[in-house]
Image (cartoon, rainbow, N blue to C red):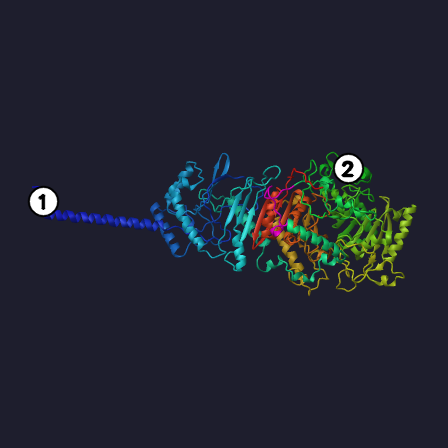
Amino acid sequence: MGMGKNPRGSKRSSSSSCSTVSVIVFVAFCLVGLWMYSSSSVIPLQKFSSSSIKTSSKFRSEQRTPLKDRVFEDNPGDLPDDLVKQEDDKISDNDKNNENYQSTADQLKEGGIRERSDGEEDSGTMVDRSVVQKDDDDGTKLENENVLENVQGEDRQSVDQEDGDKGTNQSSDRDDPEKGLFQSVERDEAEKEQSQLPEGESHREEIEINGNGDQESHVDENVLQNEDQSGSHSTQEGEEKITTHSDGKGDGDGSPATEGQEEEKVDDQQSPDTVATPEDESRKQENDEKETSLSGESFPDGAQSEILNETKADQGSWATQADQSENEKERQNVRSSEKDESSEISKSEGGIKEETGGAYGYTWELCNATAGPDYIPCLDNEAFLKTLHTRGHFEHRERHCPEESTTCLVPLPKGYRRPIGWPKSRDRIWYNNVPHTQLAVVKGHQNWLKVSGEHLIFPGGGTQFIHGALHYIDFIQKTEPQIAWGKRTRVILDVGCGVASFGGYLFERDVLAMSFAPKDEHEAQVQFALERGIPAISAVMGTKRLPFPSMVFDVVHCARCRVPWHAEGGNLLLELNRLLRPGGFFVWSATPVYQKLKEDVEIWKAMTSLTKSMCWDLVVIKKDKLNGVGAAIYRKPTTNECYDKRKHNSPALCDVKDDPNAAWYVPLRPCMHRVPVDHIERGSQWPKEWPQRLYTPPYWLNSSQVGIYGKPAPEDFEKDYEHWKRIVKTSYIDGMGIDWSTVRNVMDMRAVYGGFAAALRDLKVWVMNVVAIDSPDTLPIIYERGLFGIYHDWCESFSTYPRTYDLLHADHLFSSLKNRCDVVAAMAEVDRILRPGGKLIMRDESSIVSQLESVIKSLHWEIRFTFSKNQEGILLAEKTFWRPTKLSSDN
């Protein structure tokens, strides 16, 4: 019957069925548990050091443009051993998975993955795949897969390899749902781990790839500010922000990258598909060393950092040129009030004026001036010159700056090209760069210059040395051996220099000449000098003192300089007396010395009387037979004995309250200052011979005097020199990729002790050291060490022609200007005096550097490199040939 089954058989069958279900359920739970255990074993985000990089969630591929002369290459980084898969391990797939799971679990228990020590090396295949390089016929592409992949066995790697074999070029993880899910889980874990990091220990670096192929990398600025505000120090050696750029040019005019371009954040680690070659390792090591050295040397920590910052308290014992120029207080007060009023209109936060429209918020126009490409705002102020009632004292050749700062850009001469390099430039320049031929017509017979095709040729002659400057230079030393070029005599003043061949050939005798001449009918004479690579400024001996300290020039030279020294009580010769060191020489080579014409004889008699009353000693008169000229050499006294014995107090001695160092817009005075005689006073002793004077603190620097950086003045001097030697060698020469063979004319726009210029001594350059009038007056120190410089207010235009410097160095210049004048106008002046292809090195507060970076980009300059640390920044930019097309409506 259907119902007649054995009950025992039914029981046995039921028991067997329950047992099978139990086994299945048990196995299922085991599998589920194993799966859950493995899925939770996500590798936490590694706590990287200061060079680590936080990855983003954007994925796209871009064409990578090769970089030339790269300073900091984005090389594949190193992973800890815990994340490295050994290629030679002979382990089955399951064993590998199990070992990876166990290793991950152990790491999680220990609180995360340890950091790789400096001595560890990478081995095997990298697991971090932030950057994957794939070669094809068109070049190399960057594929950004912005994740840290968990090591979960060969299955994931095989999937990646299959994708690579098929030639897929993924730009998004959305193409692979499984991969996207995995990365979503990992990002959650990464964000959780990141949120647990202490403040100041998280670093983020962004690498921007612009339309020109340039790369920029940035660090989250908030992190820098947080560390600085908290005053705490994490395990890293400081927050850093580095931006590197290629030499690759974009458009021919150097136009900036397209605005609104996307930012790309990538993890700087080596792809598992990329095999590291010995060349890669060598390049990586080299760039790591550069990066480390530049960050360490540009902004040193600890004891070295104190040399970077000046304090107002430290400057208390140092007078400024503005303070010393007491006679110009009224003028300065008027100008200050005008600037204060205009600053309310023209300055925004940080002294930067932003306008609507234009590139990066700034609109530029070409200067609409009669001088055209040769425009010097403070010497070509036509509106003011029309108001002058007299020109008898060359007032029209002196500085008369516009009431409003100039913000237009000077046009380039037609056919302008990059200047010829030194030393060839001494003998020839491109005609189109300084297209003036008048001097060739009127002075060609004196071998000033000649026109030859597309060049202007400089035979090395002059009015007093037709047969060459070098013979004339040697003639002077033979006439007075105590001059001792390049030893006792190091820094001279050449008055009425012409095209400055005298100063140009003095370089062969290791002598620096500060050459100057007015912007007069000898058109472009100073511009010729600067184009040749010879130092010179546009200035005139008129009604005001020259912008130099007293007693700083070893020799003053005048070769037919057309200055009436004897006129009006010798006012102009008395100015030379102020500038000449006690014991220094005045070399006068002019027709009254050797000709017997009536006018010459009268001038000679007047000069003889004047120099005797000034207590100058006529050392020698000698004629140069080769050139048919003669020279008279005078010497300034080293004591006051002669002054006290004079029967007539004419010229008079200056009042003791008159400061001989006051030189910024200070009217000439018909008087002489007494010679310092106290052995600790500046001017009482001759400086040490060159080159010892370069690195020896001046004898008159008192140890009881606090230096600019807070140390005793002599120690401050030495520390500053050591600091700049280190910076120049490690950062500027070896670290930034500057081709110094193209650099000749250099300006330190805010010099202190002249340490930057001293550090460049071994290069074929000269440095114009500018001491701002509102800074401590350290210019006498610069001259004492055998360098030269000038006083200047950067709220005004500099007395030089456009396109005359190859490199400008601005150390905390703009932060010192932002509360006094329009910094955008100051940048327009930087653009005016810098040559196309010239470099600007800016060191300043990181906020100032960041703001001015936009201004620089609006000028279509190329940002070559930026770096910031501890709220201090450095920027390297290169001026391009770009000029705006719109002409300014202002005359």
Q: Nearer the viewer, residue 102 or 702?
A: 702
Magenta-drawn stretch contains 32: no
Q: Position of residue 494 (x, y in %)?
A: 78, 49
Quadrant of image for the N terminus: top left
- Binning the other alpha carbons within 10 Å of mark 1 as few (below 14), some (14 to 19) or many (20 upward) gives few
Residue type highlighted by circle 2: Thr
Mark 2 vs 1, N-terminal side: 1
Q: Position of residue 297 (x, y in %)?
A: 59, 54
515 left or right of 718?
Answer: right
Q: Nearer the viewer, residue 855 or 651?
A: 855
Magenta residues? 346-364
Label 2, on which residue? Answer: 437
Label 1, on which residue? Answer: 5
Element assignment for label 2: loop
Element assignment for label 1: loop
Residue type highlighted by circle 1: Lys
Q: Position of residue 307 (x, y in %)?
A: 62, 58
Q: Nearer the viewer, residue 886 or 831?
A: 886
Specify whether residue 737 is in view. Answer: no
Quarter of the image holding residue 435? top right
Between the C-alphas of marks 2 and 1, the distance is 129 Å
Q: Is residue 220 above or below residue 889?
A: below
Quadrant of image for the C terminus: top right
741 left or right of 63?
Answer: right
Magenta-drawn stretch contains 349: yes
Specify whether residue 673 is in view. Answer: yes
Q: Position of residue 472 (x, y in %)?
A: 81, 46
Marks 2 & 1, CB-CB < 8 Å contact: no
337 left or right of 577?
Answer: left
